[in-house]
Image (cartoon, coloured by chain):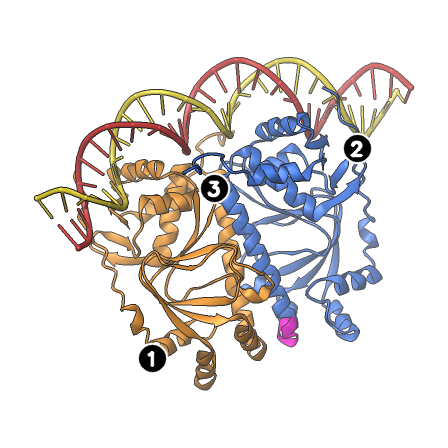
Chain colours: A blue, B orange, C yellow, D red
Amino acid sequence: MKSPRKKPLEIITTPAHLCTVELRLRLLGKLPFFADLPAEDLEAVNQKFREVGFQVEEYIYHEGDPAADLFVIAEGMVRVFQIAPSGRRVLLDILAAGDFFGNLPMLGAEEYTDTAQAQTPACVLRVGADPFQQILNQYPGVTQKVLGLVAHRLQAANERVFLLSSLPVERRIAFILLKLAGRLGQEHEVGLLIGTPLSRENLAEMAGTTPESASRVMSQFQKEGLIAAGREWVALKNPASLQALVDEEPLSGNLM
Amino acid sequence: MKSPRKKPLEIITTPAHLCTVELRLRLLGKLPFFADLPAEDLEAVNQKFREVGFQVEEYIYHEGDPAADLFVIAEGMVRVFQIAPSGRRVLLDILAAGDFFGNLPMLGAEEYTDTAQAQTPACVLRVGADPFQQILNQYPGVTQKVLGLVAHRLQAANERVFLLSSLPVERRIAFILLKLAGRLGQEHEVGLLIGTPLSRENLAEMAGTTPESASRVMSQFQKEGLIAAGREWVALKNPASLQALVDEEPLSGNLM
DNA sequence: CGGTTTATTGATTCCCGTCAAGCAAGGTGG
DNA sequence: CCACCTTGCTTGACGGGAATCAATAAACCG
């Protein structure tokens, strides 16, 4: 078997301290929920945020910590996960620039229900519960936008429940790959490259399986020419076939 | 093995057509998101809702239907689920009076992503996307309440992802039983009775397993005195032990 | 009191998790 | 630039938990 090419994935990250004011403003303006605000309001909103830089693997908050802040990613990727009593990690999501996280404190939750960790070097913006509440009070349109986003995430979470409950490992992996490619994919000579370092272990944590099983499935996919993959990277060569794999009917019992 | 008592569960449901105006007002006033509205506003809001009655097993909407309405349960129980290509059903939730459902249309979703069906005879209130949008525009406080509720559901869904990914069937069932009891439980001589008809199949659909496996686990629980159960009903006799079962550490590797 | 639906239980199969060994990639320092 | 070491990936062997298939029994309904 031929070994895949090496390191197609280049994480280009501005050093954390370069999370500049201009970057912040540009970012906030592009956030879905602030997109409609006029410039001056945007400036006011911006005042309430403070930026923080994190190195790879650095923790942003831990499950159980008092939920004091809401976060928005300016640059880099962040993973949020939970840890099972068995020690197994369950990756809830991998987030990129523009995504928010940190269990919307104002919903009444007292503490974080998950742990957030930098998947790559990252710069995130932080806002306290009170200032954020002020924003919501002042701009009802923003509240509606946030509601839409959260509802969308709820739907995604339900989709995930669905697939964990009803699909075998092979299809779960295919599903996860497609999801990630949809959000983090970038065109590349080797295929649709998933734009974050992604180990077999990460994949396993998202698909509810083990690194070994994930590896077996990935090998299989490579043999079939569906993907190209290497150490901590994956690219889709044939998304359509992967999708077909996920949707596939069990091919029986419909002939009567 | 001694057979459990029969039919502790009496579903007391007003006939669907008795979903009266008074009932509606009382109900809307008790809804978390309308709780703070003054009486006159509540009356205005009430105007926008129309009630619909459903018989057991009747479908309220199907996955893929255009998402035109938001629903609130006045009386009875409703289940929302999805259907896997394999034909397997995945029960997302069983909802009771006061709960809303129907993929908040205003989030931009074009069609329902799940199917809703009456688990018992039910009376539900329906509001179109536009009128509901008006309510949100007019009462920002309501929007925030809704946001809180959706965020809470998101958290519950994540919890579910977590348990499906990391716990064996026995614990998943225990978890589901506790969840249901928390939301639908009523004190009863046989224990904390779950207030909805609940077949082994329903349980299996929630826990991501099969009716047979669910049955085996339930038999086990009965032998251990943790629960009492019969045809389409379950009561918890020892919630604390069930909880302990869910939380249990894997009892190893901590002695050094 | 039949007929139907739901639950139970057993036998069998198999997917996948676990344990374990070996390999490839990539960074580091001489 | 190469040897070395760390870390992540692959692959095999094995075992167990749970799905599947199947038959019986109990509960409910009219």
Q: Secondary structure at mark 1?
A: helix
Residue type, label 2: Lys
Q: Secondary structure at mark 3?
A: helix
Report if residue A140 lies within the magenta region: yes
Q: Nearer the viewer, residue B125 or A136?
A: B125
Q: Is residue A29 above or below residue B236?
A: below
Q: Is residue A162 above or below residue A223?
A: below
First-in-chain label (3 vs 2): 2
Which residue is at 61% across, 69% downward?
A144
Q: Say left or right for A104 vs A255.
A: right
Looking at the rendered structure, whether the residues under marks 1 and 2 are on a common chain is answered as no
In this rendering, the label closer to the viewer, 3 or 2: 3
Name the dominant secondary structure of the magenta segment.
helix
The spot of residue B33 in percent (x, y) is: 48, 72
Q: Say left or right for A129 vs B4.
A: right
Residue type, label 3: Ser
Q: Which residue is mark 2?
A: A7
Which residue is at 43% across, 84% downward?
B39
Q: Say left or right for A141 vs B114.
A: right
In this rendering, the label closer to the viewer, 1 or 2: 1
| The N terminus of chain B - image quarter | top left
Q: Which residue is mark 3?
A: A165
Report if residue B115 lies within the magenta region: no
Q: In the figure, residue A174 lies in which quadrant?
A: top right
The spot of residue A74 in percent (x, y) is: 75, 55
Q: Say left or right for A1 vs B51.
A: right
Q: Which residue is mark 1?
A: B22
Q: Is residue D21 above or below residue B225?
A: above
Looking at the rendered structure, whether the residues under marks 3 and 2 are on a common chain is answered as yes
Q: CA distance from mark 1 to mark 2?
A: 67 Å
Q: Is residue A126 visible?
A: yes
The spot of residue A112 in percent (x, y) is: 56, 54
